[in-house]
Amino acid sequence: MFVAALFLSLSPLVAPAAQQALATDGYGAVCSSQVDATQVGLDILAAGGNAVDAAIAMHFALAVTYPYAGNLGGGGFFLLRDANGEAWFLDFREVAPAAATPDMYLNEGGKPVADWSRVGWKAVGVPGAVPGMWEAHQRWGKLPWKELVMPAAALARNGYVIDHLEVKRLQRAAKTFKKDALAARLFYDADGEAWPAGTRLRQPELAATLQTIAKDGIDAMRGGAIIEELVAASDAGGGILRVEDFRDYRPELRPVIRFDWQGREVLGASPPSSGGIFLQQVLTSLDGFPLRLWGFQDVRSVQLIGEASSAAFRDRNKWLGDPAGRDFDLQALVDKDYLRERRRRLSGTHYTRPNSDMPQPFAEHLQTTHFSVVDGDGAAVSCTTTLNGLFGAKVMAPGGFVMNNEMDDFAAKPGEPNQFGLVQSSYNAVIAGNRPLSSMSPAIVVVDGKVDAVVGSPGGPTILTSVLQVILNRYVFGMSPYRAVNAPRFHRQDLPPTLHFEPRRLNASMRYALSTLGQPIKSRSTLGDVNAIFRTSNGWRAIADPRWSGGAGVVATPAE
Ligand code: DON
């Protein structure tokens, strides 16, 4: 068999139309938001790696070439359906440092101070990225660890080409990010301007760190020079991280949320992700409504999906958090009778008002990233990874990597909104060693015992509605893979009550009809960045979200 990488060299200028299907033979498909990372995944599949190997290598590559979200200093969720059909969920999300306290983001008057949990070292959770990738490799990897890390080290050493989207992100983050001396030197010129598009960006410190990780494996992140220097930087910047936090961090294997949906099986992530429960609640409660008959462009469809989403957000915010703090049976939230009763109350013509009005959500410019992989044996990985905010806490470890601000995903003060406008409960309070509740929602759909779709997205709470709507588009509205991802989306999350929609999603009469029900409506330029893979009768289709031009989905195998 011909090696895909020999004839498939992706250009950074891959046009959206070319992202769909580059048919080759025998290896699977990969899809990410950055073209060099996609190439790395493809190379690993071509070298005989499985989906897990490709995903690990892509995660490391994204830490280099997608630095506002890809990471060594963050965390995420890794959902796997292996070649035997077994499903696994590896949680490598950040934890609150041992020195964290429930009131650490409150001022003397007891009010949350947003900046403390969002910017600078105090906002940083103990990252799980490297331990997570290590654990995935130990359990399911096939190629040697070093082979999975070295492509990223090479990208850091030799550089990658910055595109126009990255320039914009650097410009947006500049004011705060440039205060970090290493970030200022790496990402901005002597006048403090972001490097122009087309610049080859080299990251020597990160290259050295990755080389150490390639050589020493997990030990490189449990102590030693990389961690000691990081902790010293944290101390100097008012952070609370300790070397022991890194020594003690463990990724966790969690239950996979799996449920039948109209003859298919949906696999999702359990807490601290809210993704699987959200999908199960919404898809189950929408069952039985004639959405397909009404169609995509119908006000009742939008209203019902919005109602079901809002109701699921209400439960998410009230009941979910780190499973360690749960004192009830999670099954109660997906119980058949409970969801049957919810379905009975859902209405295509009645708008359920949240009990109070809240400020608008969405500090703009936030980033996370999702990538999807399938291999030639039918295994699939759906992985979402994050620094939380754009360039996380906007501070860098001396080892050349950006640190997360995941502590802001906790409820700094239960009952008050966070940066996404989410009003959450004490189940998500800041507790040392706990993980903050997340909206990241890697998902896999299985049909007739085979992986049929691998889906995920960034976007804070809009992740949940983006993933849901891609699944509805594909399976209920019968769209092609490309349309299922490209179709304009909308978002409702209970509080705040506003329905956000992308241009072309709601026509004027739908907007009018929805507003007469009493809901505020607002347009948003984009919702989500889905990188998904679908099975079709002609083989895989890998769709990098056409909303963003930098991504790349590549199919490396036709249908058998
Ligand atoms: O885990 C979460 O829910 C958030 N940290 C995700 C943040 C995010 O998606 C921002 N991206 N656009």
Image: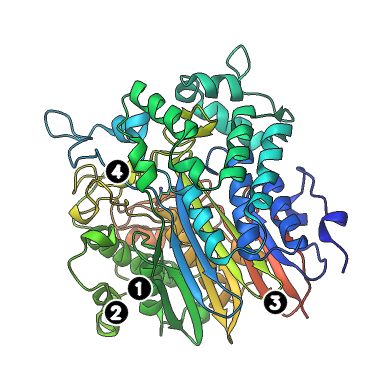
Q: Quadrant of residue 111?
A: top left
Instruction: Give the mark nearest the N terminus, 3 or 4.
Output: 4
Foreground residue among 289 and 406: 406
Find residue 536 and report its horizontal and vertical position in percent: 70, 76
User: Which amino acid lies under the numbered mark 2 shown in the image of this protein?
Assistant: Leu
Foreground residue among 99 and 408: 99
Q: Secondary structure at mark 3?
A: strand
Q: Where is mark 1, residue-wise?
A: 281
Q: For residue 339, which numbered disc appears in the image?
A: 2
* CA distance separating discs 1 and 4: 23 Å
Q: For residue 418, which numbered disc appears in the image?
A: 4
Residue at (58%, 19%) from the top-left corner? 185
Instruction: Give the mark nearest the N terminus, 4 or 2.
Output: 2
* CA distance separating discs 2 and 3: 31 Å
Residue at (49%, 74%) from the top-left corner? 87
- Left or right of 326: which side holds 398? right
Q: Where is mark 3, residue-wise?
A: 536
User: Which amino acid lies under the numbered mark 1 shown in the image of this protein?
Assistant: Gln
